[in-house]
Image (cartoon, rainbow, N blue to C red):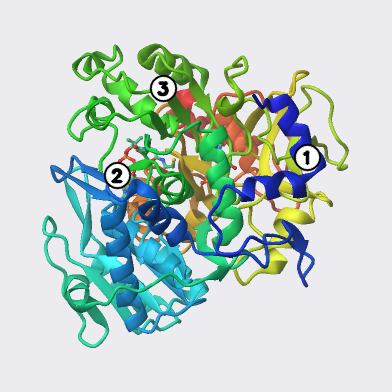
Amino acid sequence: MQTYDQQYPYSIQDPEGFWMEQAREIPWFEMPEKGLSVDEKGFYRWYRGGKINLSYVALDYHVENGRGDQAALIYDSPVTGKIESYTFREMRDEVAKFAGVLAGLGVQKGDTVVIYMPMIPQAAVAMFACARLGAIHSVVFGGFAPHELAIRIDDAQPKVLVTANGGIEISRHVHYKPIVDQALKEAQHKVGTVVLYQREEVEPATMIEGRDHDWATLMETAEPHGYVEVDGADPLYILYTSGTTGKPKGIIRENGGYAVALKYSMNYVYHTKPGEVYWAASDIGWVVGHSYIIYGPLINGCTSIMFEGKPIKTPDPGTFWRVINQHNVKTLFTAPTAFRAIKKEDPNGTFKEKYPTPSLEYLFLAGERCDVATYNWSKDLLEVPVIDNWWQTESGWPMISQMPGYGMRPVKPGSASKAVCGYDIRILGPNQEELGPNEEGAVCIKLPLPPSCLPTLWNNDDRFRSGYLDPYPGFYFSGDGGYKDEDGYIFITGRIDDIINVAGHRLSTAEMEEAVASHPDVAECCVIGIEDELKGQIPVGFFVKKEGVSAEEPELERQLIKLVREQVGPVAAFKRALLVKRLPKTRSGKILRKTMRMIADGKDYKMPSTIEDPQVLDEITTDMQQKHVGQAFA
Ligand code: COA
Ligand code: AMP
């Protein structure tokens, strides 16, 4: 049996050999001759020259190899009461037909398509249909507002946009089409074609003649389209993620490296076998959804669950156990916040008694720090290994995790364990020096990165270099801080930058600040992420009003909350904005966001030596205290 202790050093010392071996697990049309190469721009690329198609790898291949009648996707939707199952054959046929629809609308290899859809099977069909044509999809999460969608449309420049009339958030109908209409009005890039799926549970959306096409009508006459061969290093998708500015970053994912890394991770990280049922309770708008609702499980011949609901209130905190019980789920993957939500509503896990979960073998948690209390509660309740795994949109698959495929090692709560094969993770200090055991620094990865990791940013090589490569030459800078203990276990302590993680959703405070600053009565402002018992972190705004503004704090706060909701989206969960007299700053005018965060979280902080006026910190502390902002003053 292979062990981590053999495989990890092999993957680091001979990445070419290691990843060419893994590449043989994938049905290429033509195997690449080489794994790793460097392109004209100096960026590392995997599997150039290979010929592949991920719609073929995930669907047709399984139909051709005896899995045609196995469920590929089970759509379980407590918000509509629907459960539908699609076999690999049915999925392939739907995808081929929708690829025919897109081709008929002019979509070709290399074109981009934006998908803005709720958690319905048609979203998976649209993604695979793009992959089938060699077109590049860019899925935008439904909780983002029109402005955010418009920014992504302008960057991705799609030929076609695919959407639906709406989603259902517990019982609230979210009408997607007006959001799309408004975004298309705001975007500079003109999208000539919209395909609209009208679901029966949500009020029908109005169509704009000439531009909008009805999904069902197009499918009636569509001819199935075959798969188009693409290069191993051709992009499969762009997924936008929050950066430290108001403009999101377009992470590029390439076909070959993604297929190889996902297959490898399904085997060795998630420890699944073809035919098993795998459930990632996330959303297709996030990287977890791309990798482990859509591509990973299907590439591995597993059945994937697409769940349209929440861990609570749909209809109760027993919904996860019901799904596991009903569909024989072996592996559950979600964010710790989902378990915190269940624990809050059902602290003794009484709902679990109603739905035993004998099929469950593993719980994987990722997307945010897994606190020890949540780890212990989930482990005691489910009586299976609970595996914290650390990764990012940028990688597309885990970077630090237990690898049960090679056997479990002892758990240290608070650590996601050791580096996954392929990732040479180092903790670096301010002078780029490698730090010793238990010394906290920047979490970096020695280049080259393994397959699936971003080669660069969409249309923005400079930002890729300056954000990820330049800070620590020879390394990829993750943006997270952390330390490694004497046994090589890595502890992630949180983002070093202004990115926050709200209920497992990665958001930029800069984007929220832009919205708050756009209010005519606001002189200056900042938004920080503070600790929250349920969501991990939540954003809080602090603002100074302009001279002569008579509006009072409650009214201004209400307007600012509305503004952020309209400009960034409800997912920001921006619910507090505090009026303050002044903001704490350095002498050069930099707002002391980190110090404010420490105050709210009740952590010890050192008075920054560069502070302009130390008294402002006392004022801010009093404000937080009086308004009960932050765990320290709850
Ligand atoms: N379309 C439209 N609106 C959406 C949306 C979508 N796809 N997803 C979320 N929203 C809205 C919600 O309705 C909510 O709006 P509200 O302020 O009017 O209530 C807001 O965005 C925040 O949503 P959410 O973060 O889901 O918070 P919640 O309070 O509704 O639920 C949890 C809290 C913990 C139950 C929920 O966040 C959860 O299940 N998290 C699981 C983790 C997860 O999926 N992580 C993704 C990465 S792995
Ligand atoms: P995203 O790109 O949305 O997946 O968010 C990535 C960020 O989420 C990382 O940079 C971390 O800050 C955080 N994150 C993800 N998984 C973990 C984890 N297991 N532990 C701690 N932080 C995590």
Alpha-carbon distance for marks 3 and 2? 21 Å
Among the two numbered marks 3 and 2 on one chain, the one whose residue lies closer to the N terminus:
2
The crowd level at tag 3 (other Cα within 10 Å; few <14, some 14-19, many 20+) is: some
* Earlier residue among tags 2 and 1: 1
Dot 2 amino acid type: Gln
Label 1 sits on a secondary structure element that is helix
Q: Is residue 49 visible?
A: yes
Local secondary structure at mark 2: loop
Label 3 vs 1, first from the N-terminus = 1
Amino acid type at mark 3: Glu
Q: Which residue is mark 2?
A: 70
| Numbered badge on residue 512 | none
Q: Local crowd at mark 1 within 10 Å, few (<14), some, or many (≥20)?
A: some
Q: What whole-number distance in Å separates the C-alpha atoms at marks 3 and 1?
A: 30 Å
Q: Give the residue type that dot 1 points to.
A: Ile
Labels 2, 1: front one: 2
Left or right of 579 on screen, residue 605: right
Q: CA distance from mark 2 to mark 1?
A: 37 Å
Q: Quadrant of residue 380?
A: top left
Point out the image quarter for the N terminus.
Answer: top right
Identify residue for label 1.
12
**Position in image of residue 52 (x %, y %):** 54, 64
Q: Is mark 3 within 8 Å of ligand 2?
A: no
Residue that label 3 marks: 361
Q: Residue at x 43, y 34 (%)?
A: 335
Residue 608, position as x, y percentages in the image? 74, 36
Residue closest to the far bottom? 210
* Residue depicted at x 57% and y 17%: 413
Sort mark 2 into few (<14), some (14-19) or many (20+) by Cα contacts within 10 Å.
some
Q: Position of residue 344 (x, y in %)?
A: 32, 21
- The mark closer to the camera, 3 or 2, is 2
Instruction: Determine the residue positioned at 51% across, 23% down.
Output: 371
